[in-house]
Image (spheres, rainbow, N blue to C red):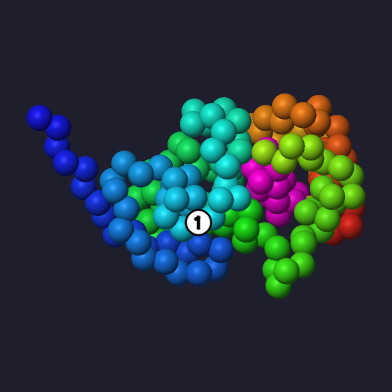
């Protein structure tokens, strides 16, 4: 007989807001964010950690939220794509994505933005090669990556 799923109360900071929430022990972080908190900008793509659509920041580092349990984030600071813009103003990176047409269907965009944001935080003026390495865990089936790379480099040049 299967043991009932246990739940646990976790305390996390999500986009600057402190949250305490009861979660089932086996709830994936991506489903906690989307289903429990309503932060649907984090996309579920592959459920295997291959596509990067679910990328969020956990204590400042990009992670694939389909590969972590919500309980593993207990005590952490999480940032989702909804947490990038401040006071309704797009970041330089988000603006560069718009200006450089770095999206088509938009499904990969949240993960790309989160991976690129992490890159720009540690390397404010990346080369094209730096960008390609940073986003290699994010799959885009539409753009061929050229405009995405151009947008991240441009954001770095303007001081994202």
In the image as oriented, which residue stretches furthest toward the left?
Answer: 1
Residue sitting at 67 percent across and 30 percent down? 139
Question: Quarter of the image containing the C terminus?
Answer: bottom right
Labels in figure, total: 1
Residue 38 in view here:
yes
SS for callout 1: loop
Q: Quadrant of residue 129?
A: top right
Rendered location of residue 1, percent (x, y):
10, 30
Rendered location of residue 118, percent (x, y):
67, 49
Instruction: Specify the principal SS of the magenta part.
Output: helix
Rendered location of residue 23, percent (x, y):
32, 53
Residue sitting at 42 percent across and 62 percent down? 12
Residue sitting at 60 percent across and 50 percent down? 41
In the image as oriented, which residue stretches furthest toward the bottom?
Answer: 87
Rendered location of residue 69, percent (x, y):
38, 43
In magenta segment, residue 84: no
Q: Quadrant of residue 112?
A: top right
In magenta segment, residue 115: yes
Q: Pointer 1: what residue?
A: 38
Residue 77 in view here:
no
Q: Determine whether, in the image, residue 146 is placed left or right of residue 68.
A: right
Q: Determine whether, in the image, residue 2 is placed left or right of residue 13.
A: left
Question: Which segment is the magenta one?
Answer: 108-123
Q: Image height check: is 139 above or below 39?
A: above
Q: Residues within 10 Å of mark 1 (few under 14, many from 20)?
A: few
Q: Determine whether, in the image, residue 118 is placed left or right of residue 96.
A: left
């Amino acid at each position: 007989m299967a043991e009932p799923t246990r739940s646990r109360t976790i305390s996390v900071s999500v986009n600057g807001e402190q949250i305490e929430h009861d979660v089932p022990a086996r709830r994936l972080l991506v489903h906690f964010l989307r289903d429990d908190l309503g932060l649907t900008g984090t996309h579920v793509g592959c459920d295997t950690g291959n596509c990067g659509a679910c990328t969020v920041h956990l204590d400042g580092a990009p992670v694939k939220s389909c590969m972590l349990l919500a309980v593993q984030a207990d005590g952490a600071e999480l940032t989702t794509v909804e947490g990038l813009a401040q006071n309704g103003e797009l970041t330089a990176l988000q603006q560069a994505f718009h200006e450089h047409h770095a999206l088509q269907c938009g499904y990969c965009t949240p993960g790309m933005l989160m991976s690129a944001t992490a890159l720009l935080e540690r390397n404010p003026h990346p080369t094209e090669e730096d960008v390609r390495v940073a986003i290699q865990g994010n799959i885009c089936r539409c753009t061929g990556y050229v405009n995405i790379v151009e947008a991240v480099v441009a954001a770095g040049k303007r001081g994202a």
